[in-house]
Image (cartoon, helix red, strand yellow):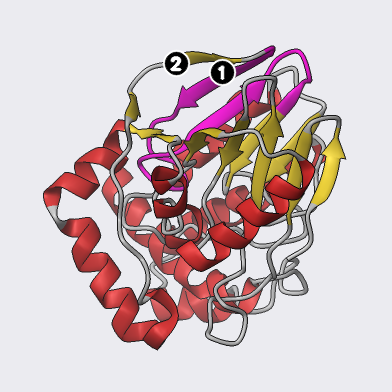
Amino acid sequence: MRLRRVQKDIYMVRGMDALPSLENRGFMSNAFAVLTAEGWVVIDALSTPELSRDFVDNLMRVSKKPLKYAIITHYHPDHWYGAKTYKELGAKIVAHKNLLEFYRSGDAQVALEANRQRFGELFKGVTLVAPDVVVSERLSLRVGEKSFEIIPLPPAHTDNDLLVYMPKERVLFTGDLVMLNRVPFMGDRNASSKGLLQALQRIKQMDAKVLLGGHNEPMDMSAVDFTIGYVQFLRENIKNMKAQGKSIDEIREALKNNPYNRYAMHDAFHNVNVFKVDAELDMED
């Protein structure tokens, strides 16, 4: 884990383009931190408390100011499961209201146990923590001299996505909504490919110069067009083939070779995305 400065007072660590494993310690997503006069604001918590502690150790070498907030962009393990570290250090956890509902329902613990079964010892140290600040509508947060606009979205990548916008800096933290030269994961049970397109169009209208996402190097607005292109490619092709009476297996086979198969995570996510979009289009009809 190597801490990098994105620009003045904004830092990141870059995860691997891979699925979680014991070998990579689950370090397959990015995390960000903004240094303010009052202390640190962290965006996303990594996959485990061990990783988030490493991240905090890196931040403390820059400044030993306290951790004030940890903003969770959505409930996937690589963004939420490391949150215990920040809670223990006194930071307030900020998340979408639907993440709190997921936590309270007990489904989050069921999902954690399933992940422990799937990934062995990787998640043994994880303790789920609930948000202290629940976002149900746009929230303005000021920490020291820095302003953060926290924007909850309707279902897109998940049903609990947050955007975090720093207007003065023109920096937008996009979670897993925007990808560049990487296939997005659209297979979450609460995802909406139609909603994702709407979220991406909303992002395009924002005055952001730098996009900081969960799985890429820092991006610009061209990354939004890349992501829109992939989502539209799936929706349009699957819709056309369904109209021709093709089965899901025929659709999957027809889309096996496609313009996106050279990009990162295609082999891991593409077929899942095809099945999910196929099912969504049935519901839309």
Q: Find disc 1 in the rendering and name its residue.
A: 149
Residue 207 occupies quadrant: top right
Q: Amino acid at mark 1?
A: Glu
Q: Residue 223 location, x and y as percent?
A: 76, 44
- Residue at the (47%, 55%) spot, across then down: 239
Distance CA(mark 1)–CA(mark 2): 7 Å
Residue 269 occupies quadrant: bottom right
Q: Find disc 2 in the rendering and name its residue.
A: 138
Q: Residue 16 location, x and y as percent?
A: 69, 70
Q: From what the image shows, is residue 202 above or below residue 176?
A: above
Q: From what the image shows, is residue 215 above or below residue 248?
A: above
Along the horizontal axis of the image, is 261 left or right of 285? right
Label 1: which secondary element: strand
On residue 212, which mark appears?
Answer: none
Along the horizontal axis of the image, is 30 left or right of 207? left
Question: Label 2 near label 1: C-beta < 8 Å?
Answer: yes
Question: Which span is picked out in magenta?
Answer: 145-171
